[in-house]
Image (cartoon, rainbow, N blue to C red):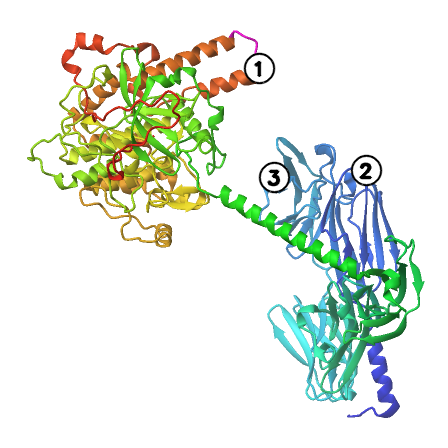
Amino acid sequence: MRASIRGPIGSLLHVLLGVFLFHPEGGVALELLPSSSEVLLHSESNFTVVCSGWSSVKWRLPQASDGGHGVLVEDAGTSSTLRFINATWRNSGRYTCEEPSADQSRAVDVFISGQGPEQWFVPQSSPHVYKYADEGTVPCVVSNPKLNVSLYERPDKTKVDGVKYEPALGFTGPLNDAGHVCVARNGDEEKESQVFYVFTVFDSKKMEVELSVSSQVLKQGEDLTVNCTVRDVDMVFFSWNFPRRSEIEPLTDFLPNEIRSFVNISMATVSDSGVYVCKAQDSQLRWTVRKNISITVLDRGYVHLRPSGNTNISSPVHYTVELKVLVDGHPAPNLTWSRLNHTISPATINSTHLKGHRYVSTLTLHQVQLDHTGTYKVTAVNEDDTKEVTFYLEVTAPPRIVSLVEVDKSAILCVSEGVPRPSVTWYTCPASIRCSNLSDGWMSQSGEQNTTTVTEGGVARVRSVLTLKTLSSVSAVRCEATNTAGGRVRDLRVLRASLLSQLIVLVAVLVLVILGVIFFIILIALWRNKPHYEPRWKLIESPSSEGHQWTYVDPEDLPLSSTWEIPRDHVVLGQVLGSGPFGRIVEATVSGLTDSDTRTKAVVKMMKYKRDGVQSLMSELKVLGYVGPHLNIVNLLGACTSQGPVYLITEFCPHGDLLGYLHRNKATFGQMDAPRRSNSDGGYMDMNKDERGRYVPLKELRDAVHEPAPPGVYQEVTTLLLSDSPTLTLQDLLSFSFQVAQAMDFLSSRKCVNRDLAARNVLVCNGKLVKVCDFGLARDLQKDQDYIIRGNSFLALKWMSPETIFQNIYSSESDVWSYGVLLWEIFSLGHSPYPELRTTRQFGSALKRGHRMDRPEHAPSDLYEVMKQCWDEDPLSRPSFSSLVSTVGAMLSADYRQRYLQLTEDFLKGKNPAVVQSSLSRQAAEETDGQRNNQKGDPASEAKVHQLGAEPDGPGPSHSTFIIPVSDVTVETIAALDAVSPQLSEPAAISESKEVTPPPDATEPPTSSSSPDEEEESCL
């Protein structure tokens, strides 16, 4: 039978359908406040949970034995409040809020900790557990969810596996019909629960029937399917009641574990609307379950759209506004939000599904501005219907004054805008008085020509004009704009001609002053960033906990013994050996270093300008004094620090730096049969060179090796380590490498980092003995292509490790990297490293990619492996200097190693001025420490002196055997040594330059009369 509803009846059906569809029953999920699913409480505490839904809700309490004492439930329509009052451990369990009409529930697990094991398990009112089929729940509810709980089956107490445990509910899973007990453990404590007896119930479980529909609301012509399903029943009889039952026969499907009866209607009509009832009867137990559902078939689609709240909204500026509408329709409508005929981006729109075709659409406007004021429209459209809802948003804000200007000789215009429309009030200040920022002295005036316009964003703009007879009668005019959100004030000062000219002059002066200050600041910044002299050697105090940063010892805190002080009249200055932008190095003869009868050839290091770098030179003096003497470093001999410029006096090395030595003699490499020559033209590198690799030799020394030293000039009595022949051999190169490793191992043991280890900073003495030094003072680093300027420092990038370049980290490990580059220089006979990388950018990129230099031409394979180990990306994977001493030393002959050992012992036990001076300084420090220990002083000060003067924890293995106690060092005269071993008193090769004695009042060394190409230079 077919029928259609027309006229008033059809309209009434649509109205009733709208009311039914917008009924909020079962619409959204339940809400708990607070929303936590698990709550931990203290005993005797109070707690409240509020459950809210769309219809009536109720709380289901756990089945505890205390009958719910301490728990109160307050129902209030669509919400219910659960209160815990002086709750105890017995109130622990799962509390469930249910909305029966929507078949929804939310649970919260509450735990109240008990006192000791006796209060772990919450007593249950019944020990019986009934299960259907195989699964059941043993209610082992605990008061503490952190307890370790296990389930056992009695009487053998067999542990039950394959069950799920929830502290607020118990164990759920397959259970046998037997007694069960739970055991809780916490550390060494253990507690059993009460015994629960599990029974299987076969006849008490009701048959479950599920009635579902493809759609409760549909249009005429759409397909309709209603399913009635029964599960886990062997045989069931279905009976149906629905419109047109006589015309349509339900069908039945027998599926695994379920039986389904369904009604399928193709091309449904309005006459198919109504209640569909399914009755299912169990053939064995004779149980009958009845389910029904209402279905509506429409002759056409519909759209229902209504706002949630007011459509006229007012909000302060910078607040967040939400516009909401409730939407329902069939077919599902397409929803669009728009403003000023422009569609709003979906990013600000959120949709929340309710039930069926119903949902809530929300437009969120964050931190609304004045231009958000206006009309917002939401449109819902489907193929049969269209609905619209319009919102008007007014964003209120205090007015702002856009402009306040003179429009002619007697009129002033004030333009203000705001929401709602601001009102403008005028005030004037008479020229005869001085008005304050408040209301004192201001006189109210009436404005004219008030006009109001509304901008595209709905903001009201007010233009008001104040006309005066003459502006000269007032000193200031005030415009005040106010609305319900606040007010704003702006003043306009009226300037007379004389005052205006004064103001112009004042502004010009201020501009000049500001420019002068800026220029002065720029000059200071340029002066601070100007490169300055900085000693490269640093003492490490301690690494950070992560090992990535280092704390350096402040040289100011290091002690300086007065024994290092040398009378200025004992120093006779000679020719200038080297000169840089910061200082110069001068050859000198020093008297009385070991005794009054001796004179020692030395090098004096001094600053060019008294105001610059003196502190740096003193810091270098203290560091060298702290490090102490070693055979392979340029040692400190003394200093002149008073009554004139600071002199730093160090050892003299006649053959210049190692880089120049390799350049001069590289043609002799491998010429073992070349005649031995002593006419070395060695010299210090030219610090003022314009071209890279150009050297200035010392004065000719070819005869100095064989001539006796000037009378009384001290020469160290020792055998030569190697031949003084300029011919280079593989052993010579290995010897250079071994000696530098010895020096760096010594510095590392003294917690000293070099920071600029390179062949140019290693000097060559007689017998091819090399010494490590700091060569920066007398070098013009701005012209040296090996260095770049970063900030106010000079950096030799190609010798620096990656962590030093990219993280500014200096350590012994970074010195090991530089040592590897030094090896490459030695075995390439002085070539510049990374010759294939011309620019700094190329070098940095290649280093990040892991690029390393190829094996130099004259390096053995095993030595190249040492280089690659030094260039390991991980600093901690690089070899230590101690291991490098052992590795390189193993490549040398036993005879060489024995000669080196003997030479070191002679150096430390002989009367070398550096050892003697260091010994005297250490004795003075020990005497000072002893005196301080006998006095009552500041403990902090005593601890500081001890720390700074202490030896390192342990020397490196390569030089530990060469450190001789201070008491073993003796001071003898040259005459005494000659008496014992006259054959050893032959002086080393020293240039016979004419000594120049400066006048007593001279504070600067004399300049050499030789040409720049003949200047000599030294290190330190």
**Considering only vertical position in the picture, is 952 above or below 578?**
above
Q: Quadrant of residue 454?
A: bottom right
Q: Position of residue 314 (x, y in %)?
A: 84, 67
Q: Which residue is mark 3?
A: 157
**Considering only vertical position in the picture, is 908 above or below 722?**
above
Evaluate whether residue 78 shows in this view: no
SS state under label 2: loop
Q: Which residue is mark 2?
A: 44
Assign the N terminus to one quadrant of the image.
bottom right
Q: Residues within 10 Å of mark 2 (few under 14, many from 20)?
A: few
> In the image, what residue type sits under mark 3?
Lys
The overriding secondary structure of the stretch rendered in magenta is: loop
In-front residue for pair 557/30: 557
Q: Position of residue 458 (x, y in %)?
A: 80, 74
Q: Which residue is mark 1?
A: 938
Q: Are marks 1 and 2 in contact (CB under 8 Å)?
A: no
Q: CA distance from mark 1 to mark 2?
A: 58 Å
